[in-house]
Every structure is written in C-alpha cells, then in structure tokens.
Image (cartoon, grey):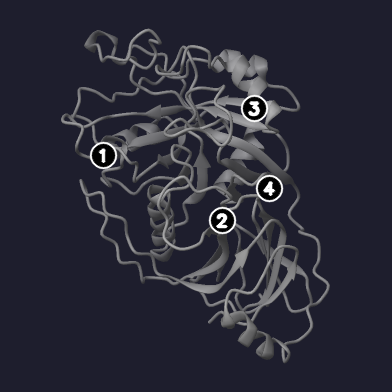
Amino acid sequence: MVWLSFITLGVGCKDAGDGPARQREADSALPMVPQLATRAAPGRWFAGDLHVHATGASNDTGGDSHPAEIMRVARARDLDFIVLTDHSNSTGSDPDTLDEDPDLFNQGPEFTHWDEAAELSNTSFLMMVGNEISPVSEDMREPTGHIGCLPRPGPTFRRDIEFSDRPRGQVTGGEALAQAREAGCYTVLNHPFGIAPWIAYDWTSRDYDAIEVWNGGLNFDVADEDALKAWACDLSLGGRPALVGGSDNHRVHIEPPGQLLDPALGEPTTWIWAEALEQASLMSGLQGGHTSVSDTGTPLELDIFDQDGAWLAMQGDSFDGTRGRWLRLRGEAANTSEPRSLVIYEIIPDTCQDAREPGRIIAPMPGWRVLYEESVTTGDIEVIRPIRGQRGHAIFGGIIPTGAVSSQHLGVSLSGAVYAE
C-alpha cells in the first residue's frame, strides 16, 4: 500500500479544501525529509515532437511545411528533435491533391525526406523520419486507426518497405501495426480515441510500444483523457507502453497554442531523458519509458528515493518496493488562467474495466486511484511524499484541468510511471 501522507514544497501550490489541511496534522508525526540525492541516471531532458507532417510527403500541409522550415521553427521554439511521420498512402505524397486516386496508392517512398533530414541534423538539432500508417474504413464511420512508425537505429529498421493501407476498409489497425513491426519500427498508437471515427483505433491488436496520450488537435481534450486511461489500463494489465504525445502539426507557421483542429508545432512537447542528442540515445530513453508530455515548457519529473534519500528510480524505471520510501514530483504550472490540479495516481494491477474490443470506440476505466490532489497556480512545483511500494503497482503524476475534461485545455503536464516490484 502507498501511504497517503505527503509533504508539499515550492511555489504556486495551495490547499484544495479541508483535505490537505486535515492531512497537515498527520504530517506532523512523519519523519523529516532526508537530503535527496541527485538522480544517478546519466542524461538530461530533450524536448521534441514525435508527430509532424511535411510538404512533399503529406498533403494538406499548406504547401510551406518543408523540412528546413520545420527545423527553423522547431529551433525557435527550443525543440531539440523532430520526427517527421508522414502518411503512408501515396495520396499523401502528392501535395497537389486532397482526393484519393487509386493510381497513387503505395507508390512510395515511405520515408520521403530521409536524406534531407540527415543533412539538416547536427549536434544541436536532430530530425528523424518515420511514418504514419493510415488505413481508413470504407464508410468513414468505423474506427481503423493511425500507427506511428518511429525509426529504430540499426539494421533491423527497413527503409525499403512499402506500407499497404488501401483499399478502404481492407486494412485493419492491427494489420497496419503488424506492418510497422515488420519494418522494425518503434510503434506508437496515435490518437486512439480521435474525434473523427476513422482515425480512432479499432483495437484489433495490442502489440504497440507506446500510446500517444495527447494529440495536439484540440489541445488537451476528452479524447486525450481517454487515451491516458487506455495507457493506465495497459499498465494495470501488466503492460508497459511508453507515454508520449505529438502535435500532429500539418502547417508549420501556426502559432502556439494552435487553432481549432490545427495544432502548433511542439504543442504538446514530448520530453525524453537521454544521454545524448543522438537517435540511438533518444530511442533508448523512449523505450525505457523515460518520458513526459507537456505544453508548459518543462517536463514533469518523478523520482523515487530510499529512506536515507539515496536515488532509486525515475519515470520508466522499476524500484524495489521494500526500499522505496520517498517520492518527489517536480514541474512547472504554466501561466494560464484555467484552473488546474496537481494529481498523483496509483495504478492498481488487474483492476482495469476494459471495454476495448475490435471496432468499438469505448475507453476503458483504469484501475487507478488518486493518492493526492491539490489546486495549483503559476510557478515551480515540488511535491515530496513518503511511500510504500506494493509489488505490481505503478505511480505517475499530472497537472491536469480541474473538473470534467472537455476540449482545448492548456497548461497540462504528465509524467511516465514508476513501477514497484
């Protein structure tokens, strides 16, 4: 069981009703917080966007989202890396049409800007090229799903593959996912509860590496909340998909925070803890779940320490539940007038109420409970709390909208989970 006692430190935090006030009396009997050690894992946070479309490889980009311009805007917004994930169907490779032409299907190449991206990359900015396999249902009212393909380093990644996503209604989301795995991709379930039925996932396979819990189309909205629930449900069922986000930007000159259904580059940002700004290092951090997603300009950091303050784990890591005694959550509450809460969740194993079935767009109810919640205002936030890790349980944190989630929420931040073993 995780103790519900806590200690909050920092700027911008305030009590949310009587709960924290009552809790302070219990806190007076707690041991003093030890000096917490520096995170022992080598690396730093790199900011990027894992879901970006470019002119010349995806249609509907406005005609001016060329890789060089994407790099210029990304660097101006303090991003360290970008992954171009242009649509697999070759209609998307023709910037002059929005209509489907059967003669254009699957003509390739699937990784259109590979060489140009390599030329644009340097020691201070990395541009990678992946794909978004984009099958669609025949009547556009049934889910199929878009599968993000991120390039793994090494010879197992196949640039010569041609993805098959047509004819309409003939390729399932699960079959697209299998194609991505055959190509050696790191696979991402993009916008699984997308607002349009035909881009929502059909749940014909669970063999993905990550879930896009935040797609930039409507800032943070109810579809993103459902995707977060699906990620937490997978953790409850014993899986460990990474938590990622992506802007899904199609027009690079849209200014933050974006327009309705027209997101800005880097909104949201995916943060990856890695040793170096190199493809292998970033992908290693991603595979390890060392991620955070936010639009606040900073990651939300989660660390576990033993009773003496020695560092044990960060988000994505497992820790010995018998040794873990302190949790620290650090981040920033962005300057926005929208009310938000800092929430710490515990995911309980085998308690997910999973309604996901092939062809149904129904979000699961994860096996989680709120360990602590308080309202936040602008500024740095640090929460330190004693814990007892129970085997199989996971913990993550978020700065999220207060109350019911609808659409276009700003100032949101999510951390990956730590796992008690």
| Relative to 313, residue 196 above or below | above
Which amino acid, by three-letter code, is at mark 3?
Answer: Ala
Count every numbered label the image shows and give the total: 4
Mark 4 or mark 2, which is nearer the start of the sequence? 4
In percent of the image, x 42 and y 54: which residue is there?
225
**N-terminal of the two: label 3 or label 1?**
3
Say whether residue 208 is left or right of residue 310.
left
Decide which of 312, 382 is in the foreground and name it. 382
Which is more toward the observer, 321 or 96?
A: 96
Mark 1 secondary-structure assignment: helix
Q: Is residue 223 left or right of residue 45?
A: left
Mark 2 sits on what residue? 416
Query: Do the residues bearing badges 3 and 1 touch, measured as CB atoms within 8 Å?
Result: no
42 in relation to 126, above or below? below
Closer to the chain start, of discs 1 and 2, is 1
Secondary structure of residue under mark 2: loop
Q: Are marks 3 and 2 in contact (CB under 8 Å)?
A: no
Instruction: Give the label, 1 or 2, closer to the camera.
Output: 1
Q: Which mark is residue 298?
A: 4
Q: Which residue is mark 3?
A: 74
Q: For numbered disc 4, what is the local secondary structure?
A: loop
Pointer 4: residues within 10 angstroms few (<14), some, or many (20+)? many
Comes first in the chain, label 4 or label 1:
1
User: Tag 2: residue type?
Assistant: Gly
* Image x and y of residue 186, in percent: 48, 38
The residue mark sitting in front, 3 or 2, is 3
Percent of width and height locating residue 238:
42, 63
Most foreground residue, 310 or 230: 230
Residue 197 - label = 1
Q: Which residue type carries mark 1?
A: Pro
Q: CA distance from mark 3 to mark 1?
A: 30 Å
Q: What mark, if any, has residue 215 been given in the picture?
A: none
